[in-house]
Image: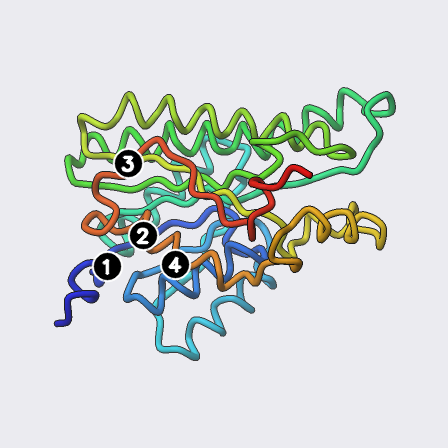
Amino acid sequence: MSYLDKLYDLEGKVAVIIGGTGELCGHLALGLARAGVEVVLAGRNEEKAQEKLDLIGEVGGNAYFVPTDLTQKGSLYALLDIVNEQSGQVDILINGAGVNSPTPFFDIKLEDFNTILDINLGAVFQACQVFGQYFIERGAPASIINIGSISGLTPLSRVFTYSASKAAVHNLTRNLAREWAEHDIRVNTLVPGFFPAEQNKAVLDESRVLEILRKTPMSRFGNPEELVGATLLLASSTAGGFITGTEIVVDGGFNAMTI
């Protein structure tokens, strides 16, 4: 085994990816599967899940889908039970489900505001409760990776509720990292900049894209595969063993740009 293989040794680990049926987390699932991780996709859309499972199967990876209502704690407990029964353990949790809305601030309805918070923040909160308790009781090193957003660091116009929900996820992550470090449970935030993703389609018209590119030093959107390296680092208890409570930003320099 080479030095890099030892450093990023994830062979035999099991990762639950909540939101793994989506565009970005689907690529994270594929990357982890290539690294020898058994991947469990959790979400509502079986058809989208099958597309991701087919891609993972083509590279010889091991993965399966568990239908899950991310907003219901009982469904998350059922997910954990199914994975424990089928795979024997969970080592990595990725919280990646998310929704967005381009609604102007004064037009945001409380119902829509609460829906976005329920999925973007509430689902992460509940999954961390369910799996965090399991990780503590199991007593083995574990990694939780919450998917944040560049808008959680610097508020963006047009996506007020989304930005607020992601900022809360960033804060939740740091709090849990502090609380659970003594149990060797690392909790970090992976912060994508602008990538092709389902929740972006409603807000990315031509003028918006030009604005983004002007403020991105690399002058392009990211490719989903470019999130995999950071994910492997955070997932590995060897390469990333002393990384917790941090935000790894993958944004082509967007957050470093001013004028």
Please give the label number shown on residue 229.
4
Task: Give the residue type at disc 2.
Answer: Leu
Alpha carbons under labels 2 and 4: distance apart: 6 Å
Task: Give the residue type at disc 1.
Answer: Tyr
Q: Looking at the image, which is closer to me, 256 or 93?
A: 256
Q: Local crowd at mark 2 within 10 Å, few (<14), some, or many (≥20)?
A: some
Alpha carbons under labels 1 and 2: distance apart: 7 Å
Q: Local crowd at mark 1 within 10 Å, few (<14), some, or many (≥20)?
A: some
Q: Looking at the image, which is closer to me, 150 or 62?
A: 150
Residue under circle 2?
A: 233
Task: Give the residue type at disc 4.
Answer: Gly
The mark lying in front, picked from 4 and 3, is 4
Q: Is residue 30 left or right of residue 237?
A: right
User: Is the residue 217 above or below the residue 106 in the image?
Assistant: below
Are the residues flagged by discs 1 and 2 in contact, CB closer than 8 Å?
yes
Q: Local crowd at mark 4 within 10 Å, few (<14), some, or many (≥20)?
A: some
Secondary structure of the residue carrying numbered label 4: helix
Please give the label number shown on residue 8.
1
**In the image, residue 52 lies at what x, y percent?**
51, 66
The mark lying in front, picked from 3 and 2, is 2
**In the image, residue 85 lies at what x, y percent?**
27, 51
Residue under circle 3?
A: 186
Are the residues flagged by discs 2 and 4 in contact, CB closer than 8 Å?
yes
Give the mark nearer the N terminus: 3 vs 1: 1
